[in-house]
């Protein structure tokens, strides 16, 4: 019936073929998407033509490469990754280990395998541990020989004890030194020593040494400066040889130079020969122990010599006629009974050859001081920076030093002490690169750069 509302009547009003016809909304969406894609591609093309390669960058580059940061062609060849030859234009390619095995083949990984740019502005040498672990978790070499442990994955878990303790090494220095004695209070000469160090306040308020009185950082801040006799020892251990000789212009006893026995021998010959010329009456009899009428001046040091350094070991002027035997006897007595037989051997290892039969050889010429051989570095395969640890008391890392009595003691921290701070959570960084370097810089020569500023800023890639 007309006018009756039913579902059939309603269904007849719907065009069942609408899905095959054009849909304005769908057509608009497709056209808009296509236009957007074309616009993006055109933008890339325009940026590429006008030198806007930065739009293709994965991220910011490190500060070291910022000078040509927008010149992608300096490192990249179009459509290719960075080749090792590009890195070697600026960076010397020192090797790691010639027998290294990487991914089942002999040879080291490429530069970009470890040093990955466009990851931020941090240094490229600050590598995450996985870069090192990919080899050192199961270290293999082409010849089967290894310098280091075969399996190391984390400093805080399976890093072995430091080699100096693992191999039970001892200090082979040829200097006899006792830390415990030098840490006592009331040492003879301590006030003069602190005064020489320009520690005026310390000299007035304390009567014992502290570690930093002797152990001071070198200009780099990484290592300790070498111990020197003139700077660290002379204030207390003066090489006085005869009370009759005074330092020029003072009433203090003269001191012999800190040098090899032969150099000291020439010095003493000159001093006693000069004394014989000034006091001929005493040069033919047993010398008195009183002071001479006029102090004998010390010979001038050679140009450029440091204070306290010995003069050039050349023969002194001969003594006056008739006094030669007296001079030789005095020098021999001084060397054999006090200076070299006692004072030198107090700290140094001195080799003494037996007297020659039938030939009288001065005592000094039969002696040879063994080189000190104080180690400048102990951890040869690791890096350490004392300046970065300057807030920590010395005894925290060197707990055995204060009680050490033997030169052979190695007063270094073991790995347990380092792990107290260098740990994964809430501590100093424990990453491999904090202490270890990959490239062997010992074979590096003097840098011989060939690039100009124009090369670094030019659009043309460097060759």
Image (spheres, grey):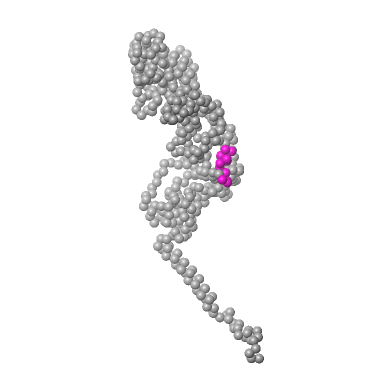
In front here: 171 or 421? 421
Residue under the image location 48 percent in, 56 percent down: 59
In front here: 284 or 441? 284
In front here: 146 or 439? 439
Residue under the image location 49 percent in, 72 percent down: 32
Q: Quadrant of the N terminus?
A: bottom right
In front here: 123 or 232? 232
At which x and y percent is residue 313?
Answer: 39, 23
Q: Is residue 225 above or below residue 181?
A: below
Residue under the image location 42 percent in, 16 percent down: 242
Q: Quadrant of residue 396?
A: top right
Specify the segment rendered in magenta. Answer: 415-426
Q: Is residue 5 above or below residue 434?
A: below
Can I make out residue 363 in this image?
no
Q: Is residue 433 above or below residue 242?
A: below
Q: Quadrant of residue 268?
A: top left
Can I make out residue 40 in this image?
yes
Residue under the image location 48 percent in, 69 percent down: 36
83 vs 9, left or right, is: left
At which x and y percent is residue 237?
Answer: 46, 23
Q: Is 338 within the magenta?
A: no
Q: Residue furthest top?
A: 285
At which x and y percent is residue 446?
Answer: 41, 41
């Amino acid at each position: 019936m007309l006018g009756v509302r039913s579902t059939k009547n309603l269904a007849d009003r719907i065009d069942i073929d609408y899905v095959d016809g054009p849909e304005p909304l769908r057509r608009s969406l497709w056209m808009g998407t296509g236009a957007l894609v074309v616009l993006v591609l055109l933008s890339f093309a325009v940026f590429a033509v006008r030198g806007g390669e930065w739009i293709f960058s994965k991220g910011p580059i490190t500060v070291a490469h910022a000078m040509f940061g927008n010149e992608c062609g300096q490192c990249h060849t179009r459509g290719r990754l960075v080749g090792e030859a590009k890195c070697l234009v600026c960076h010397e390619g020192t090797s790691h280990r010639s027998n290294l095995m990487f991914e089942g083949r002999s040879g080291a990984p490429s530069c970009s395998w470890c040093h990955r740019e466009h990851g931020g502005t941090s240094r490229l040498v600050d590598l995450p541990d996985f870069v090192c672990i990919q080899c050192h978790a199961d270290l293999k070499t082409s010849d089967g020989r290894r310098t280091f442990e075969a399996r190391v994955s984390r400093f805080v878990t399976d890093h072995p004890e430091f080699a100096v303790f693992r191999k039970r090494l001892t200090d082979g220095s040829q200097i006899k030194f006792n830390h415990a004695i030098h840490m006592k209070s009331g040492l003879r000469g301590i006030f003069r020593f602190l005064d020489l160090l320009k520690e005026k306040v310390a000299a007035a308020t304390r009567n014992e040494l502290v570690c930093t009185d002797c152990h001071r950082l070198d200009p780099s801040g990484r290592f300790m400066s070498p111990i020197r006799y003139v700077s660290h020892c002379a204030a207390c251990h003066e090489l006085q040889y005869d009370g009759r000789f005074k330092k020029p212009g003072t009433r203090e006893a003269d001191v012999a130079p800190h040098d090899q026995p032969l150099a000291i021998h020439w010095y003493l010959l000159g001093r006693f020969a000069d004394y014989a010329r000034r006091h001929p009456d005493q040069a033919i009899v047993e010398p008195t122990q009183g002071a001479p009428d006029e102090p004998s001046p010390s010979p001038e040091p050679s140009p450029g010599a440091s204070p306290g350094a010995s003069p050039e070991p050349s023969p002194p002027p001969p003594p006056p006629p008739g006094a030669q035997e007296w001079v030789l006897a005095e020098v021999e007595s001084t060397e054999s009974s006090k200076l070299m037989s006692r004072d030198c051997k107090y700290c140094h290892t001195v080799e003494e050859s037996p007297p020659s039969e039938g030939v009288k050889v001065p005592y000094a010429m039969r002696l040879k001081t063994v080189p000190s051989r104080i180690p400048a570095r102990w951890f040869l395969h690791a890096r350490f920076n004392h300046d970065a640890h300057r807030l920590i008391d010395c005894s925290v890392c060197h707990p055995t030093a204060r009680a050490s009595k033997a030169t052979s003691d190695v007063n270094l921290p073991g790995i347990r002490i380092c792990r107290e701070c260098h740990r994964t959570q809430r501590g100093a960084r424990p990453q491999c690169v904090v202490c270890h370097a990959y490239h062997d810089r010992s074979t590096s020569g003097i840098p011989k750069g060939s690039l100009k500023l124009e090369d670094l800023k030019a659009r043309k890639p460097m060759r």
